[in-house]
Image (spheres, grey):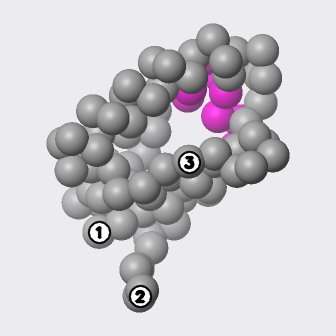
Amino acid sequence: MKYAAFIRYGNPEKIAEVRPTHRQYLSQLKEAGKLWASGPFTDDSGALIIYETESEEEARQLIEQDPFYEAGVFQEIQLKPWNRVF
């Protein structure tokens, strides 16, 4: 099942510093089949990350292991099941 995470950023001074590690983490998830899509909003206020997991709990665990989460960049997270139509 896919879970869409709508994320609002905070702690802006950490974004540039932690972004390379965050993207490496997402690359590993993509290779493992746990990430369907991700990217920041064009105003860099946050991001949309779509996980491919067995449960919402697993998606939350992946979020909490993200270097951006650990550095306090993820300030607000809304996680919802998502169905692709097209």
Q: Please, what is the three-letter code of the amino acid marked with disc 3?
A: Gly
Q: Which residue is mark 1?
A: 1
Residue at image location 27% in from the left, 49% down from the top: 34
Q: Position of residue 2 (x, y in %)?
A: 36, 66
Q: Please, what is the three-letter code of the amino acid marked with disc 1?
A: Met
Q: Which residue is mark 2?
A: 85
Residue at image location 64% in from the left, 34% down from the top: 74
Q: Position of residue 81 (x, y in %)?
A: 44, 70
* Observer-nearest of 23 and 75: 23
Sequence order check, earlier mark of 2 and 3: 3
Q: Position of residue 70 (x, y in %)?
A: 53, 20
Task: Tell whether 37 sits left or right of 17.
Answer: left
Separation of marks 1 and 2 at Cα, in angstroms: 13 Å
Does residue 77 sit above or below 84 in this rendering? above
Does residue 70 appear in this view?
no
Q: Secondary structure at mark 1?
A: loop
Q: Please, what is the three-letter code of the amino acid marked with disc 2?
A: Val
Residue at image location 63% in from the left, 12% down from the top: 17
Does residue 10 sit above or below 6 in this rendering? above
Q: Which residue is mark 3?
A: 39
